[in-house]
Image (spheres, grey):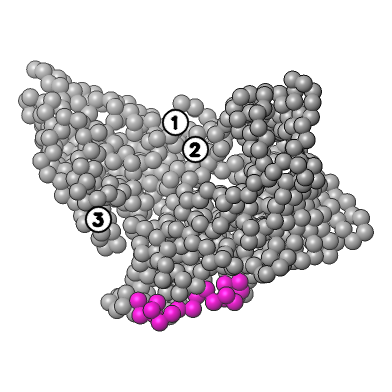
Amino acid sequence: MKKCLWLLVLAAGMLPLQAQHQTSLYDSTSVLMEESGLSHVIHHERIRVEDLTGCRNNTVLKIDYDPLSAYVEFRNVSVYRRSTGHTDVLLHNGNGSQVYDYVAPARLIYWGASQKMIQIGHLEPGDEIEYTTYRKGFTYALLADDDSRYIPPMRGHFYDIVPFWSSQPVQKRVYRVTLPTSKTLQYAVYNDPDNTVHIDQAKHGDKQTYTFTANDIQPLKPEPRTLANNDIEPKVLLSTAPDWQSKSRWFYGVNEDYGSFVPTPEVQEMVDNLLADARNEQDSIAILTHWVADNIRYCGITMGEGEGYTLHNADMNFTDRCGVCKDKAGMLVTMLRAAGFEAYAAMTMAHERIDPIPADQFNHSVCAVRHRDGRFEMLDPTWVPNVRELWSSAEQQQGYLIGLPDGATLQYTPISAPENHYIRIIANNSLDKAGTLTGTLTLTAEGQSDSRVRSVFNAPQSLWRTNLEQQLLAVVPQAEIIDIQYTDPDSYISQPVRITYRYRIPNYATLDGNTAVFIPLSARNLFARAMSHLSFDTKAEQRTQPFADACSRLVEIHETLQLPAEYKQLHFPMVEGVANPAASFGCRYWMEGDTLSFDETVILGKRVYDAQDWPMFRQTVMNQRMLADTPVVLTK
């Protein structure tokens, strides 16, 4: 069953292609669904370890589970010894070697997860492990006192996401689900153009069985910065939920019934104080969103029964001042309602596509507020601490579902225009006859670029000056920094970040009687931390897989450089122009008397790109790198 965590995904992408440490000879999952939605899952697998790393990785078998909502057990475990031909039966029908049950390691989310494990012991390459496990229940949801706690939160329904991909070879994978004929199962295979997943359906009495099979699953060779495996490799989605509207209504009802959004007197007082000087509707929304983002720290503390899909109530969130994404979203919904807004919780999937089948394709919770004109605005207090946006544009092109009393359909966040995330660098410099550069450089940034630049201040104040100096010294280590001026890091709501350097850089240019050789300072990718596209590996000319950057982006650079004399000829780097909605690049050098001017513009049009966008994106990145590394040559 899919593990559903309201955990913010910090990073997404392909699993790294590993050496073939093990091979799954047979991987079978059988699911029996009851009328209530309670599912019994038997997993049977036989693994051959191929090398010493595979031996080490399999000395212990583990099952992760939540004791409050799932029951798991090892039933059978055997080891076939290649060298002797002997089979060691460690566990048979639950009897044999000791099975240990420990609290699972945790970081930031402390919800009481556990691990059951059994020691396999010493293995040699070629040995095979065969084991069977049983599970009933799910991961986290609304709970009761008896076996009903294993029934999924959307009672009477079943859903699953079944990967038919693997980071290690799989000779055969089978997934079989049996459910009452009274249930209508929606299913679809995605990312499988070669039809490698075969489907069989059968009825027997009041039961129906669907079987999905694939043979010879090989690890996909990953391309740099590609999308999540579930977005590009075969998977099966299954759900008995009729549509997204029913899931939306359920999510709304779960939290309204629990009372997740009822403001306490303390919350109401805080909202009234925060909005005392609010100017308008949008200002009020922004004030409350940023307060929750900055004051509810990310740390998950269990509420016991009810953890998971249920959003913690206002009293718990406001008292603890901490929670995971669902709790931060719940706190914001509560405060918006206390302010008189119509607000709802919503579910989304960070850094992974949500496909049409209404399965449980969510890992993140956010907030939706309805404006007076009827439109919804999406808010994410988890992703916008110290970010000027109310919805992080690192989440553009992302699916979401609002929990509404009348139900909602699945929607996707739009592409955020590159100009919403600009980086602007303006430099005014002069060069003397000794090759010393003096001048000023001012950088401003907005949106996601603002947050990346502003991250230099995510340190004790005593280190701010050092962090800022390092941004310039990383480009020109010999720089003598005379002064640095910057906007108040805590005033991020009221103004974009602005940083101005005043400097003197000896030996910046090489000058002789007739020639000057140098690279315009503004072209040298100062604050590259805010330009994640520059970290792409551009060796490959073509791609077969889509890819993702952190965000859409606009880079604008302008520099004027007064020279010690007039130069008649200008030789500058020749780059290939790029003009495409996905990515574009332009630059210009020109002389006016003793002054050289330089312009550069980079436009990256979205966050998620198709494989065919790669040549333009790649050329844009290479052009920007070339200008940062290739000098201008002026001659008299």
Q: Which residues are magenta?
A: 253-270
Mark 3–mark 2 Cα distance, whole angstroms, equals 31 Å
Task: Provide the residue designation for mark 1.
Answer: 537
- 88 w.r.t. 63: above or below: above
Q: Earlier in the sequence, mark 3 or mark 1?
A: 3
Mark 3 and mark 2 residues within 8 Å of each other at the beta carbon: no
Does 129 sit left or right of 444 as displayed?
right
In x, y percent, where is residue 219?
64, 32
Q: Quadrant of residue 625?
A: top left
User: Residue type at mark 2?
Assistant: Arg
Q: Is residue 343 left or right of residue 232?
A: left
Front position in the image: 570 or 112 = 112
The residue identified by callout 2 is 225
Label 2 to label 1, Cα distance in Å? 9 Å
Q: Secondary structure at mark 1?
A: loop
Q: Is residue 165 above or below residue 386?
A: above
User: Looking at the picture, does residue 1 appear above or below residue 589?
Assistant: below
* Residue at left offset 35%, top offset 76%: 270
Which residue reaches farthest right? 205
Residue in front for this viewpoint, 521 or 33:
33
Amino acid type at image mark 1: Asp
Classify mark 1: residues with Cα within 10 Å, few (<14), some (14-19) or many (20+): few
Read off the residue under disc 3: 489
Question: Few, some or many C-alpha atoms within 10 Å of disc 3 (few <14, some 14-19, many ≥20)?
Answer: some
Q: Earlier in the sequence, mark 2 or mark 1?
A: 2
Front: mark 3 or 2:
3
Look at 24% across and 32% down and name the residue there. Answer: 475
